[in-house]
Image (cartoon, grey):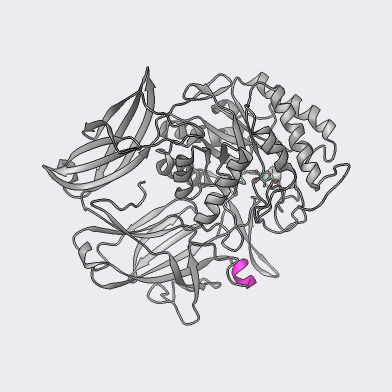
Amino acid sequence: MLAPKDTATRERRSLDGLWNFMLDPDGTGRRDRWYEQLPPGAVEMPVPSSYNDVLADPAGRDHVGDVWYETSFWIPPSWAGRRIAIRFGSATHRGEVWVNGQPVAVHQGGYTPFEADITAVATPGEESRVTVAVSNVLTWQTIPPGYVEDTAGGRRQRYFHDFFNYAGLHRHVWLTATPTARVEDITVRTGLDGADGTVSYRVEVAGQGAARLGTQLSLADASGDEVARGSGPEGVLRVESPRLWRPGDGYLYQLTVELRDGSTLVDSYPLAVGVRTVEVNGARFLINGKPFYFRGFGRHEDIPIRGKGHDDVWMVHDFALMEWVGANSFRTSHYPYAEEVLDYADRRGVVVIDETPAVGLNMGLGGGIFGTQGLPTFSEATVNAATQEAHRQAIAELIARDKNHPCVVAWSIANEPESDTQAARAYFEPLAAQARALDPTRPVGFANVMLAPPDKDVISDLFDVLLLNRYYGWYVDTGDLAAAEVHLEAELRAWAAKHDKPIVMTEYGADTLAGLHDVVPGPWSEEYQAALLEMSHRVFDRVDAVVGEQIWHFADFATSSGIMRVGGNKKGVFTRDRQPKAAVAHLRQRWSQAP
Ligand code: BDP
């Protein structure tokens, strides 16, 4: 799905700002036709942002169900005759949209974009109104899953993942005008052929008359000089001695796709293209044919007050901090991040493992840690065929959105699912195949949980890379780093013996209370976090198959409440307001040296 852009033939207008906002605790908004106008009592709510922490009110923070957003806008008279749409970067977890009281779109899935064609319901030169009902409800059939419980305190959303269920309009909202006959999608795959780079492309068009338009393509380097041109909806461009996109050097070409009617320009769309290859060879992870070692973090879109609302200030700052500590990569744990984040990673040369929102498909993790227990993961009443269908959709939407980003080098289709049962194998086999069919150019993996070590896991053979989340020294061998070191090494060697695949450590770490110090490092102290990371790094350096380390976590983040969490998850090497803990000194030292 193409991102909205201003071009010679396209225009966009931001609808970000303060929208009218109302909770719908009793679920009466549809019956009472709030899509025609919100009733008295609406407040103002910033977009983009999570709504939960903005108002100083538990009603908003703990709300379960729909909230309603409404704003008005003008469509410029000059947009007459064009296709007009409203495009949401996301609505978490479900968005239903009306324009001038008419239903125009429904989208399930909280972290991928969708648009509503409003050409037929809104008139250029007049004022229009858009209303969105956003639901934060998670069920057994959503990705991620959850369920709603009636309690003495009211309806409560239960979920199986360790981050707060922030909701709302988290990303930019655009009003867009495109030509009716238009470029609908572009797929680009890059390769190396001797000294040449190859850019194979496929252009899809849509709209009346689009099929008879001519397609022309031009590839320009970063200084704007054309290096290749082509025509037709499919083909391969060759770039002589290309400057490759590499970790640390986000060099981008620009592919301009034009639709023409004779010599008349009908549509034009520019796409950033990084020429690079990704490949798994035995236990090596190769970028441009060279072994790559991942250094970095699991992260969250999580900042004070805004929650998961996209914010350029925090984005640029977080990348600056990652670069400052020497990180070269991160995983979009545990859902697709805002598109702007991937654009920025492309430009900064930061490597990304891109993850779906499939987190919490594991009832074995209950045991009191995340507040659930005693249920089968896969069953008619829990994660079932409908959940799998939603998961399929989540994979398809992630790949459709992010397939052209050079920064994305692997797909993670789930985090810590149950993976030690035949039911898990039946569930994941078609999903792994689907991801690979949608994108044969990138390795596919999933983040494996501690409960499924190599002698229990029955699904890793379906995948290209082993992504391992391990908590030796924290959830097991707590406070005993000597034992942790032995056990971590033994497990990694067992993985390496069983599969000839690269291992990326996608989680390891310790909760750490900033300011708590300990001469003899004990759990929760800053010294213990540093010691646990140092111990883990010693082990990784001894096991050849380990090709990466991504610490859990970049920064402290909000979670639901529970006795395992002290004001959220404290495994960040930075605090939630991005101040360094003691472990950062070790990281800066380690990550400034060649792997
Ligand atoms: C893993 C999860 C991650 C949690 C982390 C933790 O993948 O989301 O936040 O453990 O417990 O189970 O800190």
In the image, 469 versus 338, the foreground residue is 338
Q: Position of residue 52 (x, y in %)?
A: 58, 65
Q: Position of residue 161 (x, y in %)?
A: 64, 50
Q: In the image, ligand 1 is in what quadrant?
A: top right
Image check: 147 left or right of 408? right
Image check: 472 left or right of 356? right
Numbered circles on residues, count: 0
- Please tell me which residue is depicted at 72% across the width and 53% down the height of the picture: 371
Q: Would residue 406 be visible to someone looking at this image?
A: yes
Which residue lies most toward the left here?
262
Image check: 532 left or right of 318? right
Q: Which residues are magenta?
A: 57-62
Which residue lies most toward the top here?
194
Instruction: Check the picture and name the quadrant holding the C terminus.
Output: top right
Which residue lies most toward the right here?
520
Magenta highlight on residue 12:
no
Which residue lies most toward the bottom here?
40
- Please tell me which residue is depicted at 32% across the width and 29% down the height of the picture: 200
Determine the image quadrant of residue 199: top left
- Please tell me which residue is depicted at 49% across the width and 42% down the height of the picture: 345
Q: Would residue 455 be visible to someone looking at this image?
A: no
In this view, 523 is above or below 484: below
